[in-house]
Amino acid sequence: MVHSVYSNKDSFLRELISNASDALDKLRLEAFRNKDLDVDTSDLHIEIEVDKGARTLTIRDNGIGMTREEVIGLIGTLAKSGTAELRQQLREAKNEAASEELIGQFGIGFYSSFMVADKVELLTHKAGESEATRWESTGEGTYIIESVPDAPQGTAVTLHLKPEDAEDELHDYTSEWKLRSLVKQYSDFIAWPIRMEVERRTPPSQEEGAEGGEEVVTIETETLNSMKALWARPKDEVSDEEYKEFYKHIAHAWDDPLEVIVMKAEGTFEYQALLFIPSHAPFDLFNRDAQIGVQLYVKRVFIMGDCDQLMPEYLRFIKGVVDAQDLSLNVSREILQQDRQINAIRRRLTKKVLSTIKDLQSERPEDYRTFWTQFGRVLKEGLLSDADNQDTLLQISSFASTHSEEDATTLAEYVERMKDGQEQIFYATGETRQQILKSPHLEAFKAKGYEVLILTDPVDEVWVGTVTEFDGKPLQSVAKGEVDLDSGDESSDAEREEREKEFADLLTWLKETLTDHVKEVRLSTRLTESPACLITDAFGISPALARIYQASGQ
Ligand code: ADP
Ligand code: MG
């Protein structure tokens, strides 16, 4: 294995720069919207400052800053119980990779400072406020917070670097070379200048008559990043590494993207889009207030995050940026809602995302499986809400089935395996695979050798009510109505009449006895082992859906 010169610990710098960049975006926007806000936005930037003697590293921005309450609420969450647990686990984490994964899981970028620092100080001054706030913590669960009368606009985070890293070249965060290469590696695309004071050595002058032969060292401020908007560059000019780091910045994520989508539209309404399919679902994907992951920019200026006009809800896991050329900078959510162009963009982005997933499915089955495991449940919500793309959604969906215990099947694969004479796609809904397999409803299908889809996600109950067919084959619940498993079998009609006569008395008796409980009692051909089973009529709601309604008090 090639030993990487980059270590996981290094990502603390990416996180702090990412926060500083967000703070600058917010200030620019706030200053634009609120003309009364008295702030200087003429030189918004990020500064990295090293004090080799004191072994401190400061990341400073002149962005929006935080109020005392915001410091307590946001960064102060470190002291709360969830993070106490994180701290404990971090102490026990075997290696850096393990602790990085933990930090990622808990989604606390700022906290990564404690990978390299044993004390962190924060000095922040919110735009428009008279007082500033100083905060300090050793990451052990307690912190010091005080109001200070004056501090420059913005936020400075000072890390007191761990002494044990001092002799370790790989982790020397006071080294100019190290910091410079970390910024290039992780944060080159940041839209604001990231400045640092660097030493410039001029070799001894060769000119005749020049004094002495001494090297001249001057200190200069240098901008370390290129600030190029990644989405504006052609895909083949951007490296995978650059895309990955950009994804981590905008998605506040720690995983790598599964796929990158680059789009460019020219003509009457110009825009560029850079979208990512993540490789891991965030823990809050099913929270009520889970947000849309796409940011809106107008001509390179950040306008808003979680822009729900740009992506349907069932694609809320997609992260990325859309940069539109022809919108006004003070466009609001309300305006966007009515904007025909924005709706057109959403439709195009949606189609592009779905076709990308389709490509994954046919070209990179392993990645498609990862995708489906992480996001399949969300994508299926689209079967209900997005009628326009229902066909595509059905094509790119996978389902568990009686065909294989391990592998999910697509509907196309199911149709290919259909028996001669089988005209419907059969499915069973329920809570677990075991429960469904045990159900008497399945007996006749098993006996016939018919494959049955096993649908156990809550959303399955709902979409099967909307989707009626795939590829001309009706979808049929095994628990509903008269499933005619004997169609095409001429002799059976006579046989059935015969048997119905034989059991007529029993059926009448059952019907009378159970009159309060069932609508009808029928002789069935679907059972091979169980004596009886309950079904709903063809247009009734399924038992599982009935349970959902019951649970929600309807
Ligand atoms: P995230 O960036 O994913 O929200 P972080 O742990 O990185 O999580 O930061 C937590 C919050 O602290 C941010 O959302 C932001 O509100 C605030 N914050 C952090 N750094 C800064 C900064 N430099 N300026 C202003 N606010 C900041
Ligand atoms: Mg952050």
Image (cartoon, rainbow, N blue to C red):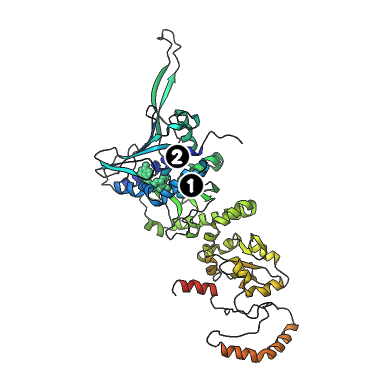
- Residue corresponding to mark 1: 102
Q: Is residue 91 above or below residue 431?
A: above
- The residue at the far right in this view is 491
Give residue 41's quadrant in the image. Answer: top left
* Most foreground residue, 447 or 367: 447
Label 2 secondary element: helix
From the top left corner, tell me how far across and down residue 386 is, in percent: 51, 63
Residue at left offset 55%, top offset 43%: 235
Residue 457 appears left or right of 26 = right
- Residue corresponding to mark 2: 115
Looking at the image, is mark 1 or mark 2 earlier in the sequence?
1
From the top left corner, tell me how far across and down residue 273 is, in percent: 49, 49
From the top left corner, tell me how far across and down residue 29 is, in percent: 35, 47
Label 1 secondary element: helix
- What label does residue 528 carry, if any? none
Q: Is residue 393 above or below residue 420?
A: above
Residue at left offset 72%, top offset 89%: 498
Mark 1 vs mark 2, CA separation in Å = 12 Å
